[in-house]
Amino acid sequence: MLELAILGLLQETPMHGYELRKELATKLGTFRAAISYGTLYPTLKRLQTAGWITESASDPTMIPPMTSKRGRVVYKITADGKERFADLLAQAGPETYDDAGFGVHFAFFSRTDRATRLRILEGRRRRIEERREGLRDVLSRAAGRLDAYTLELQRHGLDAAEREVRWLEELITNERSGRAPAGSGGEIDLPAEPLGDAPPEPPSPHQDRP
Amino acid sequence: MLELAILGLLQETPMHGYELRKELATKLGTFRAAISYGTLYPTLKRLQTAGWITESASDPTMIPPMTSKRGRVVYKITADGKERFADLLAQAGPETYDDAGFGVHFAFFSRTDRATRLRILEGRRRRIEERREGLRDVLSRAAGRLDAYTLELQRHGLDAAEREVRWLEELITNERSGRAPAGSGGEIDLPAEPLGDAPPEPPSPHQDRP
DNA sequence: TCCCGATGTATCGGCCCGATACATCGCAAC
DNA sequence: GTTGCGATGTATCGGGCCGATACATCGGGA
């Protein structure tokens, strides 16, 4: 899962570990809390061994307020890595639908084709519907067996589940009708983000530096 | 965390692993998905080594449709275990306020004194407020830098955070005014005394073993 | 000058998960 | 009656991920 996230971020631009972690935290929002370094560095090493990324010494592409000549390691995605990223993005296993997995996939939806987006959205919806039904069962059948606090917990969980299903329904409807996420206010005046209204097809002409 | 949950359930009644897992799943609702056996059994072993629980062969207290004379192992909490449970219930570290930790603590609120309940509720609120502020920052400051899907994810996360803060506010208010959880049924003020205002439904008749 | 906080890389022990492998029971089909 | 099968039930293993911890470097203020 984290593998997908890292590959996705490095596809936008090369980074070192610290930046990676920060981007991860903001981009993944609630569904995935900030990643730990105890996870990040071993994973980077793993990706490197697999050949999906390479490391290099400090690099002119990094952000200005940084000085150089440090032990910083900048990671960059390889051609194999991009292939791997595309594979991971498209294929959806059971882990794609839990909180963390769904969050990561969703965060890269602008690089995913519409069919895959719909598949993932619907899979997630099914997952949450199951959770919702389980909660309803407990609340109707086992209500007398549980104390007031436990019941309140179930109720809150049920509410959140119903709300998420509604959210997903809306997203699915939008996808089917070819609209981008509804959201409030403005969207997409990004320099290089071609997520259009009508074009059902290929996003992401994101590339590296010259 | 799981340690607390197991000790809490075994305090209600002795159980074997399979039951434990089922109870865990229903009692902990959304905050904590069903526990894996790959976690459960090692943890039980750990608790046993520590002396918090003991195992014994099949037992007349188990549910009727079950036959005996099987390899089933029934776990029972010890006196030390009860002490341990009380300690864990009362003390609150940082892990008490993440999703899983809070869920477990909350599920046992009927066995927790009011001061501790308030402390935990307020700690959780602070945690979610921080998450909420982070999300607001991203949405106001970094909006232009992110694509529409990522923004939608943040918006949904922000909505959930705001909602949870409101939920917590309500619970805190109720605690302060001496009421039980608002929802549908009042009950429980202090451990093991399920007397409520006007319970629409029969409150939990679970008992402790002498 | 000297320390301090932000930046930055890295490891270690441990929790927890998914996959997997077994054994036993109730029961229905043959 | 025995064969097969799904539900029940216990257990282990490899691996992902986490929190704590240890360092090392840099800019800037006391």
Image (spheres, coloured by chain):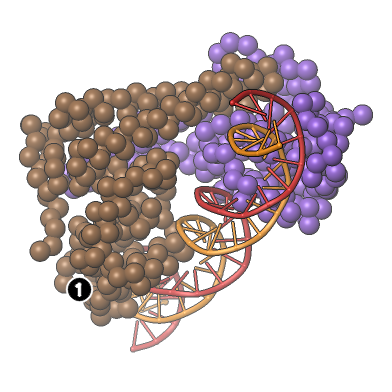
Chain colours: A purple, B brown, C orange, D red
Farthest-out residue, top: A185
**Residue at the location (33% across, 32% down)?**
B122
For label 1, the SS is: loop
Left or right for B204, reference A96: left
Total marks placed: 1
Where's residue A108, x and y in %?
A: 67, 33
Q: Is residue D9 above or below residue D26?
A: below
Q: Is residue A171 visible?
A: no
| Residue A204 found in image quarter | top right
**Closest to the observer, B103 or B70:** B103
At x 10%, y 64%, the residue is: B210
Q: Amino acid at mark 1?
A: Asp
Q: In the shown orientation, is residue B204 left or right of residue D11?
A: left
| Image quarter of residue C10 | bottom right
- The residue wearing badge 1 is B59
Q: Decide if residue B38 is on the left or right side of residue A177.
A: left
Who is closer to the viewer here, A53 or B68? A53
| Residue B72 position in % (x across, y down) | 31, 74
Residue B143 in view here = yes
Dot 1 crowding, Cα within 10 Å, few <14, some 14–19, many 20+: some
Residue, far right: A210
Chain under disc 1: B
Left or right relative to A162: residue A186: right
The answer to which quarter of the image holds residue A100 is top right
Q: Position of residue B102 (x, y in %)?
A: 36, 42
Residue B20 % position (x, y):
31, 60
Which residue does the image show at 34% across and 69% down from the upper left? B50
* Residue found 35% across the figure and 51% down from its top: B25
